[in-house]
Each structure stands twice: as structure tokens, then as C-alpha cells.
Amino acid sequence: DERYKNLKGTRLRLPLLGRELPFVYDEYVDPEFGTGILKVTPAHDPNDFLIGKRHNLAVINVLNKDGTINKNGDPYQGLDRFECRRKILEDLKRRGCLEKIEDYPYRVGHCYRCRTEVEPYLSPQWFVKMEKLAREAVKAVKEKKIEFIPSFWKKGYFQWLENIHDWCVSRQIWWGHRLPVWCCQSCGKMIVATRKPIQCDRCGSRDLEQDPDVLDTWFSSSLWPFSTLGWPEKKEKLKRFYPTCFLCTAWDI
């Protein structure tokens, strides 16, 4: 954007916190929308996170898990997120830093159960590397080991798997299968195992704590044929029907 060419490479000061921010150019910004300048908060927006990675920006989380502002948002620490927004507007007006407020259409995620407004929030999670698995799944359809009826569903299948992302498999909910991961409380090593380990293989400590997160529900769903067809015993039904030769599913499966 030629309007801001002179600002490229400079640093700006965040008026309410005094923190210096780098001014960067990125193709994600639409110069025709609004001012053509976009704030970037890598810790609280998926697109901003990608911009931050491209430009090596600091990832600063300003929220506690309960939706209040943490120490990174001082002097607003402890305020509820909505109260904080109102206070920021007041402070910007008071300092003469607010030019105008206008409404525009925007997508805001809400919880499907309680309709609470969702705030993107960075947290440690467990992922399954999907590239190799997706490659094998694509190959199976191209070699006609798997057939789609009607055949036009193949297009969406290929589009999804050929642009696959790693799969976040950890969930912070009550119901599900616990992650088979233990953390050594002495040295911090993460141990992935099919059975609970007796001791840490790095430091020898027996003080191990299992990750409280549970697996994505698809892991539970995948156990359905085993739980209904007699596993772990080698039942004839299990041998006959698993793996299956036919699936009648909705579009999302």
C-alpha cells in the first residue's frame, strides 16, 4: 500500500501500554477495507497468528482462562474482557487517540451450547501429524481401493486431504479417553506410552502425572466395532465385519 510505504520498517508505540510495535507489510491485509491497516494479535486470532509467524512477531497472551485480563494487559489486569474493552475506549477518548467508531459486519464465534462469545486463546495442545496419513488415504481412492457413491464426493475428499493440517486431538472436557501421556514432575519429560510407566526413563523419578486432557471423540467412535463385535476375544463377527467394506455416512464423515 503506497499510502504507508514510509512507515515500513518503523516501530510504533501502543498508546495505552507504551509497548513498541513493528510496522510490517503483509499480503493478508486488504488495502480497500477500512484504513488498510490491520492490528496483529498473534495470540488471539488464527490469521494474526500466521502473520506473526511470517514476520517473527511476539506472541503475547493477555487473557486468563476465566476471560479476565492478565498481567500483560496492565493497567487493565483483573478486568473482565468486556469491561476492559469499555475501559480502553474511555481511555482512548480521554487521550484524544480515538478518531471514530463505526459498525461493520464481522463473524464472531459463539459456543454452540451456552452461546458465550468465544475468544481465541493460545494453549499447549497435542497434535497428530497428518501429511503421511492423508497421502495414504488419497492413494487408496486413486487406486480404487475405496470408492465413493456418488463419485462427485471425491472432489471434496481430495481437496480436504491435499490441503490437510495437523489434527489437534486433545480436548479440555470431562468425558472421553484420557491422553496416554504422563509428565515427570521431577524433570518435566513427557512420556507417551500404552500403559502407565513405572518411572521416568530420563531421571528415574516415579512421580508421574497423567495429562488431564482427553482425546477427540473420534477416538472413542473408532472403538465402536471393537466394543460391539466381541474384542478382545477373536470372535467370528469381528473377523467378518472388521475392517468393514461399506460405510453409509453423512457428508462430514
Image (tube, rainbow, N blue to C red):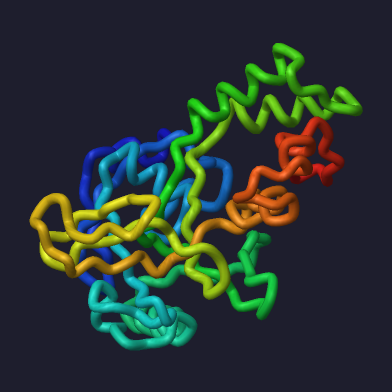
Q: Is residue 40 visible?
A: no
In this view, the residue farthest toward the top is 143
Left or right: 50 in relation to 109: left
As drawn, 27 above or below 111: above
Left or right: 220 in relation to 127: right
As drawn, 29 above or below 149: below
| Residue 44 placement (x, y as % from top left) | 42, 61
Instruction: Tell me where residue 195 sits by quadrant.
Output: bottom left
Q: Residue at x 42, y 64 (%)?
A: 121
Left or right: 203 in relation to 229: left
- Decide which of 50, 235 is in the foreground and name it: 235
Instruction: Tell me where residue 63 sits by quadrant.
Output: bottom left
Quarter that holds the N terminus: top left
Q: Residue at x 55, y 70 (%)?
A: 118
| Residue 111 placement (x, y as % from top left) | 63, 71
As drawn, 41 above or below 248: below
Q: Residue at x 10, y 58 (%)?
A: 204
Instruction: Tell me where residue 138 sits by quadrant.
Output: top right
**In the rendered picture of this protein, how many numbered marks are placed on residues?**
0
- Decide which of 182, 168 is in the foreground and name it: 182
Q: Residue at x 40, y 56 (%)?
A: 180
Q: Is residue 114 visible?
A: yes
As drawn, 37 above or below 114: above
Quarter that holds the C terminus: top right
- Decide which of 91, 150 is in the foreground and name it: 150
| Residue 127 placement (x, y as % from top left) | 43, 47
In this view, the residue farthest toward the left is 203
| Residue 119 placement (x, y as % from top left) | 50, 68
